[in-house]
């Protein structure tokens, strides 16, 4: 459904994308996972025919994004990262306008947007500017779906909304996918990676890894521990100075310590006690997507060191 081949894009001296290649299969929910500034939005704009790559090529349902942009735009539903609907129009007016742009009506495809619109219906006469963050996202999703696209591009749809709205949004995506729509979504939230069929870990305009979330985590070959102490800053600094440390990063109220072999907890406790951290807690844990992402970044740093 989507194919990108060696896509590169620069803005002045800033290299936004470096030879990015990926494919998205029919009816797949594919996630681009990475922090702000990683290049996700640039790739989305190229796929949505809004930008032309400096190098490489991309196609959507077999159509070239440069030569056949008109055909592609009729087949895509695109929800940009920044709220882009008309703030002075009501919920109903925004929907009616976007339906008219694609030569359809709200009634014609109401069944598709019904699960989303039901939550918006009490506010149908409210101006878009007066909606909460979560409701704005649902209105934007409804407008992107109103012409029943073949592919849905969602650029960081849950950024800036509360945890409950994030959960509701992903539940809506599951229903949309069941309607036979292919979804490409980007997010900076690592916990959302497990909600996708496949993901691409993205950083500095490059793809670090592409696979299912389970397979990406399974490739984590280091030993991992969660270490806790009252003085977290001193703990992080001390762990990074330990000769046996491969990497150490803060995770919530703990520090995730990775080593190339299974450590002796008593040996580490003695080291921490010697550095004014008595009574530290050490627990072996399984790696998650974020641990694998940081490992790949660490490998990249060592390669370019």
Image (spheres, grey):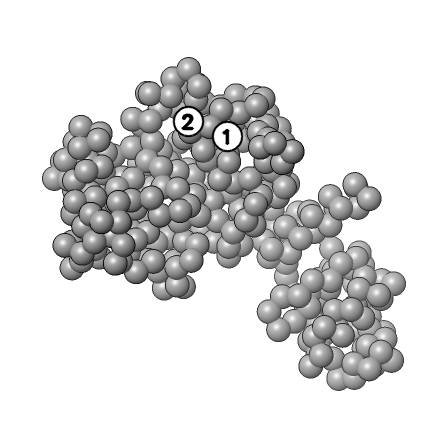
Q: Distance between the residues labelled 1 and 2?
A: 17 Å
Q: Residue at x 39, y 59 (%)?
A: 161
- The reply to whether the C-beta atoms of the residues labelled 1 and 2 are less than 8 Å apart is no
Q: What crowding class fits label 1: few (fewer than 14 Cα within 10 Å), some (14-19), or many (20 or more)? A: some
Residue 217 at x, y = what percent? 61, 51
Whether residue 107 is situated above or below residue 3 in the rendered picture: below
> Relative to the observer, which residue lies in front, 194 or 148?
148
Q: Which residue is drawn at 76% across and 58% down?
A: 247
Residue topped by disc 2:
49
Report helix, strand or loop for mark 2.
loop
Corner quadrant of residue 259: bottom right
Would residue 261 appear left or right of 134 to someone viewing this image?
right
Whether residue 232 is situated above or below residue 72 in the rendered picture: below
Q: Can you say which quadrant of the picture contains the N terminus?
A: top left
In the picture, the disc for residue 3 is none
| Residue extending farthest bottom | 279
Corner quadrant of residue 154: top left
Q: Which residue is drawn at 43% across and 22% down?
A: 65
> Relative to the observer, which residue lies in front, 128 or 172?
128
Residue topped by disc 1:
23
> Relative to the observer, which residue lies in front, 289 or 297?
297
| Residue extending farthest top | 67
Residue 60 at x, y = what percent? 41, 25
Viewer-nearest of labels 1 and 2?
Answer: 2
Q: Residue at x 42, y 58 (%)?
A: 160
Q: Which of marks 1 and 2 is nearer the N terminus?
A: 1
> Relative to the observer, which residue lies in front, 16 or 65?
16
Q: Is residue 213 visible?
A: no
Residue 20 at x, y = what percent? 59, 31
Report helix, strand or loop for mark 1.
strand
Q: Can you say which quadrant of the picture contains the C terminus?
A: top right
């Amino acid at each position: 459904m989507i194919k990108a081949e060696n896509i590169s894009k620069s803005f002045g001296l800033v290299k936004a994308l470096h030879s990015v290649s990926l494919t998205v299969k029919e009816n797949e929910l594919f996630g681009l996972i990475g922090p702000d500034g990683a290049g996700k939005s640039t790739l989305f704009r190229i796929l949505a025919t809004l930008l032309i790559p400096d190098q490489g090529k991309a196609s959507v349902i077999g159509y070239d994004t440069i030569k056949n942009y008109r055909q592609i735009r009729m087949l895509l539903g695109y929800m940009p990262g920044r709220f882009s609907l008309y703030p002075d129009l009501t919920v109903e007016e925004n929907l009616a306008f976007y339906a008219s742009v694609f030569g359809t009506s709200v009634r014609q495809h109401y069944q598709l947007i019904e699960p989303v619109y039901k939550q918006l219906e009490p506010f149908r006469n409210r101006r878009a500017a007066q909606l909460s963050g979560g409701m704005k996202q649902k209105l934007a999703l409804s407008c992107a779906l109103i012409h029943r696209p073949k592919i849905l591009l969602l650029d960081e749809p849950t950024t800036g909304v509360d945890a409950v709205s994030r959960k509701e949004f992903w539940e809506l995506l599951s229903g949309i996918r069941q309607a036979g729509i292919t979804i490409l979504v980007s997010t900076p939230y690592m916990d959302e990676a497990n909600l996708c069929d496949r993901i691409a870990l993205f950083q500095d305009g490059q793809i670090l890894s592409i696979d299912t979330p389970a397979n990406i985590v399974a490739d984590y070959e280091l030993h991992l521990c969660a270490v806790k102490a009252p003085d977290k800053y001193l703990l992080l600094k001390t762990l990074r100075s330990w000769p046996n440390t491969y990497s150490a990063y803060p995770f919530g109220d703990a520090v995730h310590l990775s080593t190339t072999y299974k450590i002796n907890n008593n040996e580490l406790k003695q080291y921490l006690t010697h550095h004014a951290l008595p009574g530290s807690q050490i627990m072996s844990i399984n790696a998650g997507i974020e641990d694998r992402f940081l490992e790949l970044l660490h490998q990249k740093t060592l390669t370019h060191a």
